[in-house]
Amino acid sequence: MKIQYVVTATALAAVTSAKPHHLHQRAYSQNSVKRNIVYAPAATETQIVYWLDDHAISEDEVREGIANGTLMWGSGNVLSSTTDPHVALPTSPPTDKHGGQAADVAEDHPEEPVEDYPEEPVDNHPAEPIDNPQPKPEGPTTEEPPNGVTTPDPPTVQQPDAPSNPWVDLVDKNGHCAECDKVFPNGEIACTEFPHGYGALPIDHEGLGGWSGIQDPQYVGSDGFDDIMTVVKGSCSDGTCCKPGRYCSYGCPNPYLKASFPSTQGRHGQTVGGLHCNKDGYLEMADGKIADTLCVPGSKKMSVKVQSNLSQTVSFCRTDYPGTESMTFPVTVGPGQTGFLANPDQQTYFFWQGKRTSAQYYVNKQGVPEDEACTWGTEMGGKGNWAPAVFGTSFDDGPVQQGFSSLKQNELCKQERLGYDITFVGDGVVSACRYKSATNQWCEGDQCWEDPDRGCTVGHTLIILNMKLILCPRPLSRTETLPWYFRKDSDTQCHFVYRPRLLAIISSSTHSRECHIFL
């Protein structure tokens, strides 16, 4: 039996944060063991191409034309040099990992000195040490043409495999991602290439070549990883920071979850996730993988959606977990839109120190741009990891067979307010959780309180068909000066009232109990 769960938000201030994935303190060994890393750069070949109108011409023709005056360098670089895109930026998996794409002889590049940078906090834990940004490799040198002919700079080569908007059309209306069903080809894609075409979604705003995070455990022992370096945001937009020995993490389209992470984790509670860059410089699934695909669907017994009735966009930002635990995976919904949220099965997804885990989302205020909402934010800036609320969800697919979703004030910023209400609706919802922005109260069923540390939790039984988290504008009182107000009579019926007459009725369907506004 399939369970679907929709969360609805209405209008004013702080939203509750979900229960965290786990509770732990991060500690780091001062006696870390550093491993030597050999980096195998991809081979490149430079070719000079002379282009006249719509076809290529030979070097001899160029020389002759310039000599006799029939050819000249015009505006817009009529004749130009370029790097062969099929050689310099390979996009298809290589057939021979020891030739073509990878150099026959690996060059030893000494590691740059490591310096500790304070990383933005996650759940009040100490920051992880992170490494210095790696310098971008110099591009291939373009030959100078003969007879003093000056050539223009080569154009930037685009990856044809990368879609222009990778977040669009991957998931259908039923929450299925066909691309996510493709088995990942271990050892065939260079670490410098983001693995397009297998469901993974590039996170461009992190400046890591599409990766959501890159981690490099410096200590690897029988007791786990430690001294885990995390590459700084914005260090390598070309993806060259994904090097041998590192774990390069990626996002999956909601409601899907990352399937690749190592079986070994941090010995002090840190988590590591993503694809492993092997010693040959190729991507492979980590040894703790739970599937042969990069992404796996969330619970089939309970689906969770967010529906917005707000006037501006709102971003729910899922943490990269296991991994850097940065809030980089966005679900952004505009006015009247509905989006899926990933909801893991507790018994079959990632276990932290033997304990079951959930998906966690940072809930931002409306109108915050996605690239500012789903990344580390400025302290007390009201967005990113400082967003007003946190939402957590999972389904216990063991003997309990019940879903759990919770909403709570972000403990990092208890004074922040969302500015809209949130309501959970759906058949089978037990003790519906709500946040009332007008009074800054959290509610379960008929009970409400003002304690931001308590938040609220909703349970979902097996008979749930559809659950939504609904976001709506805050209720306005009759005494306010605006010529209209929004009245919520119950969880299943709302009114948009224009003085002195009723403009429209907001009602809900019998089965899903979703609150819809028709204006």
Image: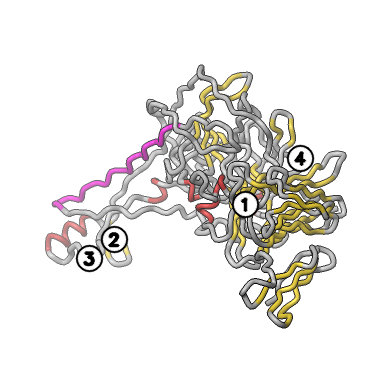
The label number, if any, that marks residue 137 in the structure image: none
Q: Is residue 43 left or right of residue 268?
A: left
Residue 342 appears at what percent x and percent y? 69, 49
Callout 1 touching callout 2 (CB < 8 Å): no
Q: Amino acid at mark 2?
A: Trp
Location of residue 267 (image quadrant): top right
Q: Is residue 154 left or right of residue 118?
A: left
Q: Earlier in the sequence, mark 4 or mark 1?
A: 4
> Which residue, given by chain and number where applicable, does mark 2 sit on?
51
Please give the range of residues in magenta: 131-148
> Which residue, given by chain and number where applicable, does mark 4 sit on?
346
Disc 2 residue crowd, few under 14, some 14–19, many 20+, Cα 10 Å? some
Front: mark 3 or 2: 3
Q: Amino acid at mark 4?
A: Gln
Q: Earlier in the sequence, mark 3 or mark 2?
A: 2
Q: CA distance from mark 4 to mark 3?
A: 63 Å
Identify the residue at the far left of this view: 68
Front: mark 3 or 1: 1
The label number, if any, that marks residue 363 in the structure image: 1
The residue drawn where x is 36% and y is 53% is 156
**Element type at mark 4:** loop
**Element type at mark 2:** strand
